[in-house]
Image: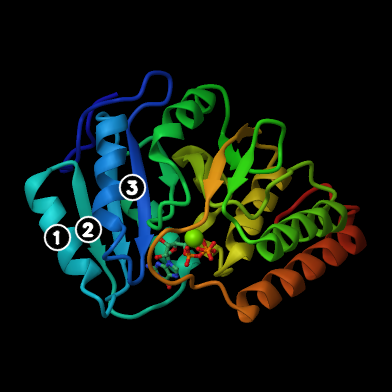
Amino acid sequence: MGAAAGTDAGLDEFPGVGRVLTVVPTYNEADNLAGVVGRVRGTVPSVDVLVVDDNSPDGTGALADRLAATDRHVRVLHRADKDGLGAAYVAGFGWGRDHGYDAVVEMDADGSHAPEQLPRLLAAAADADVVIGSRWVPGGRVVDWPWRRQVLSRVGNLYTRVALGMPVSDATGGFRVYRVAALEKMDFESVSSQGYSFQVELSWRAHRAGLRTVEVPITFAERERGASKMSPTIVGEALWRVTVWGVRGRLLDGGRSGRP
Ligand SMILES: Nc1nc2c(ncn2[C@@H]2O[C@H](COP(=O)(O)OP(=O)(O)OP(=O)(O)O)[C@@H](O)[C@H]2O)c(=O)[nH]1
Ligand SMILES: [Mg+2]
């Protein structure tokens, strides 16, 4: 596989996967971004990074530009306004497809997802369409995460599994690998979910499209710096969307086909 015509992105490939782009959405992550980008590039030099910044008031976008100026494997997509995690990922995935990448990675900028574990996720992607870094499979761990957040995540995932009948232990996790061909089959550009439900919706679409999803245990750490963007609105969005998908799936076709 070579570079697509007209692209100036990296030419390196991860064995068995191809050209890989790590998409890092950012909103006010100036204290975290350089560390995370440096760790990705240092751990897997064949992998490129795209920062998708929503005009962060703290100057994260300008910082990302400086990182890109010193490493041609780092690129930046600037968006005018804060428009949610889901929209940032959809834009980043589209950029990756248009620049000839074979797979994209989702990774938070806040240090919760360890770049040092990315090679294990990518190795699993050699034999899968979707790889989910999972806190809730044997071997998965959470570090320094308040018990309230752990309960919310566990209960949310239990509800999701029961409502959707989908065999995924960590459907809300945001450390993942997608093959671009799989994203196309999932019609990713029509996804409108924003918060946790963005992750659930992509898992659900992959499941319904008959794609192969595997979960790989990860160690998830509480962010060290900066503020969480998690809110009751995000939890509420996930709850009502999962409920609607579950009911619709059962009423329309017994949950066997179609998409959310
Ligand atoms: N571009 C963009 N990035 C966002 C937006 N909202 C959140 N992010 C980024 O998405 C990633 C995840 O956001 P977090 O605030 O860590 O949310 P979370 O991981 O669900 O919550 P915590 O566990 O409390 O940190 C981080 O890199 C954020 O900077 C947004 O509206 N636009
Ligand atoms: Mg976070």
Amino acid type at image mark 2 = Val
* Residue 94, image quadrant: bottom left
Residue 63 can be seen, yes or no: yes
The secondary structure type at the circle numbered 3 is: helix
**Front: mark 1 or 3:** 1
Mark 3 Cα within 10 Å, few/some/many (few <14, many 20+)? Answer: many
**Front: mark 2 or 3:** 2
Could you tell which of marks 1 and 3 lies nearer the N-terminus? 1
Amino acid type at image mark 3 = Gly
Pointer 3: what residue? 96
Residue 241: mark in rendering: none
**Place of residue 217 in the rendered image (x, y in percent of width and height, measured from the top left):** 61, 34
Q: Residue at x 68, y 47 (%)?
A: 170
Q: Residue at x 64, y 55 (%)?
A: 172
Looking at the image, which residue sits at the far left?
69
**Place of residue 260 in the rendered image (x, y in percent of width and height, measured from the top left):** 71, 61
* Residue 205, placed above or below residue 15: below
Pointer 1: what residue? 65
Residue 76: mark in rendering: 2
- Left or right, 149 with reference to 99: right
Q: Gap between marks 1 and 3, in whole Å?
A: 18 Å
Amino acid type at image mark 1 = Asp
Instruction: Identify which residue, 206 or 48, lies in the foreground.
Output: 48
The secondary structure type at the circle numbered 2 is: strand
**Place of residue 42 in the rendered image (x, y in percent of width and height, measured from the top left):** 25, 33
Q: Residue at x 64, y 58 (%)?
A: 201
Mark 1 Cα within 10 Å, few/some/many (few <14, many 20+)? Answer: some
Q: Gap between marks 2 and 3, in whole Å?
A: 12 Å
**Front: mark 2 or 1:** 1
Task: Check if mark 2's residue and mark 1's residue have beta carbons within 8 Å.
Answer: yes
Instruction: Identify which residue, 244 or 100, lies in the foreground.
Output: 244
Could you tell which of marks 2 and 3 lies nearer the N-terminus? 2
